[in-house]
Image: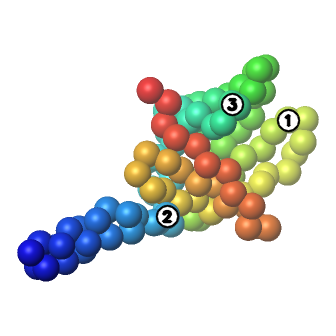
Amino acid sequence: MLRLIAVFIVCAGAVTAQEWRALSGAEIAAALTDRSLTYPNATQHFYASGRTLYNAGQDSWGYWAVRGDQYCSQWPPGALWDCYDMAVMGDALRFVGADGSTTDGVYAQ
């Protein structure tokens, strides 16, 4: 009986031990190209053309690219690009800003 309990504890620990895994540039491109994410109050589509459409009640068009191992975006009329590290856990993607702030999204169905 103790062995059965020990096996259950080990298996349960493996299921709950899932953690965020950093993505490489190639993985970021594969994860985002022609895909849509949903956030708590918004959606975003990442077109293969490098355009991105963010909607939180109103459309906002920008640009996205992968530079090195980071996701980068630019939102007109601004000219600067902001870049983020990315991580994955299951169907969730996390954008990590230079200041350590995070934004999580999940794939839209």
On screen, residue 85 above or below 77: below
Q: Which residue is depicted at the point 79% across and 67% down? A: 99
Is the Cβ of the residue at disc 2 closer than 8 Å to that at disc 1? no
Q: Disc 2 designates what residue?
A: 20
Which comes before the other along the chain, label 3 or label 2?
2
Which comes before the other along the chain, label 1 or label 3?
3
The amino acid type of the residue labelled 2 equals Trp
Position of the C terminus by quadrant: top left
Is the Cβ of the residue at disc 1 closer than 8 Å to that at disc 3? no
Residue 55 as seen in the image, left or right of residue 13: right
- Label at residue 42: 3
- Label at residue 38: none
Q: Disc 1 designates what residue?
A: 76
Q: Secondary structure at mark 3?
A: strand
Instruction: List x then y, in percent, for residue 89.
Output: 45, 56
Residue 72 seen in the current view: yes
Residue 38 as seen in the image, left or right of residue 42: left
Residue 95 as seen in the image, left or right of residue 87: right
